[in-house]
Amino acid sequence: MSNNGLIQHIRNPPKPSVPVVVICRLLLSAIPIAQIAIGSVYLEDCPRNHYIPIYLIVVGVLGVVLSVVSCLPGTRQRKDEPSTPLTRLCKIWNVLTSVFIFCWFITGNVWIYSIYKPDYKKNTTNIEQYCNKTLYLFAFWTTTLVYIILGLSLVCGCCILVCRFVFGYEDPDDG
């Protein structure tokens, strides 16, 4: 494949089929829905830091809302189309929500990692040190999963760049 073909492929990537998009959205919505459910069920079960279930509920709701908003018709703008008020509003919404999610994520990191390892056994002498094991470990691992995914993406991206430079594509005009 020549550089021109590759560049055209990057500029106009093939569109996935609707069933693939729907299945991916459902799978990606599973974690935010679980965050809402676990945060709601264990809302009062972490006296050590009562913000952890609230963190899970808010991040879960925002995840579901972003997933739903991205599926709405008219929220995507093609390069050759003029901007509409709806697409501008969606862009502003996405920027504001993304900034809030980033700040909320950092705050959640502080709340979760600052109490590592809470006491999982509830009794009258340590009630202030207690946090439900399911709640805490779910919050801990979903937060840690974000770092794992970011790390893997960074490593994969660097590998692709290195391969691209090492095994670069040869232009047919180059002799």
Image: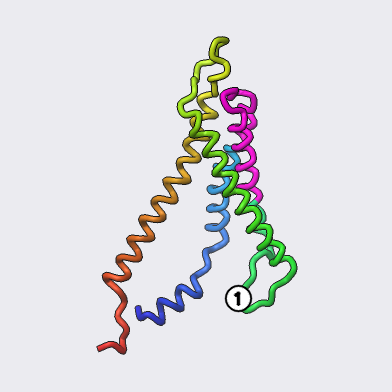
The residue lying toward the viewer, choosing from 12 and 101, is 101
| Residue 173 sits in quarter | bottom left
Q: Residue at x 29, y 80 (%)?
A: 170
**Relative height, residue 139 to residue 153 (above, below):** above
Tag 1 residue: 79
Q: Quadrant of the N terminus?
A: bottom left
Amino acid at pointer 1? Lys
The residue lying toward the viewer, choosing from 164 and 4, is 164
108 vs 81, left or right, is left
Coloration mode: rainbow
Task: Give the class, few, some or many, for how many residues have Cα within 10 Å of label 1's Cα (few <14, many ≥20).
Answer: few
Residue 67 seen anywhere in this rendered image of the structure: no
The residue lying toward the viewer, choosing from 29 and 39, is 39
Magenta residue check for 52: yes
Which is the main secondary structure of the residues drawn in magenta?
helix
Which residue is most to the left?
A: 175
**Relative height, residue 93 to residue 175 (above, below):** above
Magenta residue check for 28: no
15 vs 5, left or right, is right
Q: Position of residue 115 (x, y in %)?
A: 50, 28
Range of magenta residues:
36-65
Residue 47 seen anywhere in this rendered image of the structure: yes
85 vs 54, left or right, is right
Q: Position of residue 21 (x, y in %)?
A: 55, 58
Q: Residue at x 31, y 77 (%)?
A: 169
Q: Residue at x 52, y 27 (%)?
A: 134
77 vs 138, left or right, is right
Which residue is most to the top?
A: 124
Q: Quadrant of the C terminus?
A: bottom left
Q: Position of residue 79 (x, y in %)?
A: 60, 76
Q: Residue at x 57, y 18 (%)?
A: 128
Q: Position of residue 101 (x, y in %)?
A: 60, 48
